[in-house]
Image: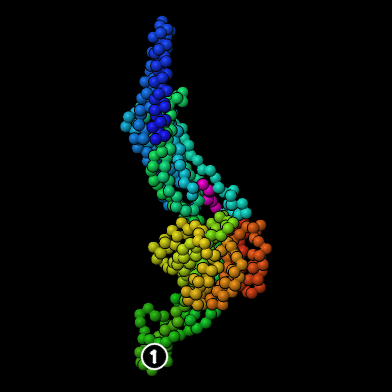
Amino acid sequence: MKATFRFAGKLAFVIILFSLLFSFAMFQGGFVSWFLFFGFLPIFLYHLGLLFYPIQKWEVTRELSRHVIHAGDRAAVTIRIRRTVPFPLYYCICEEVFPETLQKVGGNHERYRYLDRPDKLHVNRTIKKIIFPGFRRTIELPYVIEQVPRGTHTLEAIRIRTGDVFGMITKEHVFHTTNQLTAFPLERPVQLPEKVASYEQGAAPSRVINAKNSNVAAGIREYTPGDQFSWIDWKQTAKKNTLITKEFEQEKSTDTVVVLDACQYPGLNELAFEAAVELTMSLLGAMEKQACQAGFLSIGERTSYFPLTHDPFKRDWVNRHLTSIRPGGDISFSVKLREEMMQLTTGATIVLVTTHMDASFLDVVRQVGQRMKKLMIVYIQASSLITQREQTIIRQLHSEGICMNVLTEKELSRRMIEVTLA
């Protein structure tokens, strides 16, 4: 309705202006009066044509150079405008309407220098380009989105404005064209002190990655091609008069579960949460390279569990989950953690990544530590934002022998993150 009134008002303005000049020429007469009228006539016809020119029938599309990138990368975009009627246009302003998810910047480890000032990374991202199309039917407008943040971003609209030289007639239309840009979390190098492996008989850690352990024999069997010469049991071979080899206990990597705190709480540090997501991605990648039997548990508005295997499809599920995850839920992380730990197999190694420790966190961690084989906590927060209560919890956890890693802007701004898991 507003658009109709606006169109009627502009049409009335042009007609009234034309009527005034025509009346002046009729009543005044003379060369000057008619010269002014006929001199304005082409301008009047152009404004009338521009007023009825349907820019909403333009074909506007958007093309992305890449649809999947990593956080902090840049994405090249090309807006293409096609019009069937080459009506002459003096200017045209093209504006990309960015979603709220793109109103902040992603980047490398340098951005964590602002861990205590996360609002500094919020930006008012705008892209406006002015062109002079004239009679052209096809127009291309390239631009680049710099420092794309983590997440799935949907570009949905392009606003185009045009008008005459004098500004008497302006036209605007929003073209809805959808393109999706996915930015995976940045996987950073993580320095782990050692790979922890265990045997069924004991819990001694080992840094050796072998398919067999030649010191622990579980049984005997007949020789099969491919068995090593050192595996032959000569006593049993002499008794049975056939080659008998020892069967060894399979070495098993410690069952490790990385738990990410994705719960919402008042005063949540968005940049610290981004660091927690990146660290989780990096830890899972490092464990996968070490051939560990690991899993990923996300606790937030919804609880999701992903086994970390060498299946690329399952790895892709984890990547997509970490790409789209946002803090949510109205139940505290400590409450949910207690419930989830009761469903996990006892004896697992838990790596807990969090950005917040409430009053009940210490008691829950103690219960988890008694139930599980080993518990390691990675706490991420700006040094100036760590409260006195949280500092007390950190000291108590250290005194009780629980492995506690506190990562502040000092550690996160380095290229490689050092995490102690023992």
Segment tinted magenta in the rendering: 103-108
Residue that sits furthest to the left in the current view: 84
As displayed, is residue 305 above or below residue 111? below
As displayed, is residue 257 above or below residue 87? below
> Which amino acid, mark 1?
Thr
Q: Secondary structure at mark 1?
A: helix
As displayed, is residue 317 above or below residue 368? above
Q: Is residue 336 magenta?
A: no
- Residue 403 location (% of width, % of height): 60, 71
- Residue 294 location (% of width, % of height): 47, 70
Residue that sits furthest to the top in the current view: 30
Q: In this figure, which residue is indicated by the disc labeled 1?
A: 237
- Residue 213 location (% of width, % of height): 47, 80
Q: Is residue 362 left or right of residue 80?
A: right
Out of 17 and 415, give the one closest to the viewer. 17
- Residue 32 location (% of width, % of height): 43, 7
Display coloring: rainbow
Q: Main secondary structure of the magenta part?
A: loop
As displayed, is residue 33 above or below residue 318? above
The N terminus appears in which quarter of the rendering? top left
The answer to whether residue 418 of the structure is visible from this angle is no
Q: Is residue 107 magenta?
A: yes
Residue that sits furthest to the bottom in the current view: 239
Label 1 neighbourhood size at 10 Å, few (<14), some (14-19), many (20+)? some
The image quarter in which residue 205 lies? bottom right
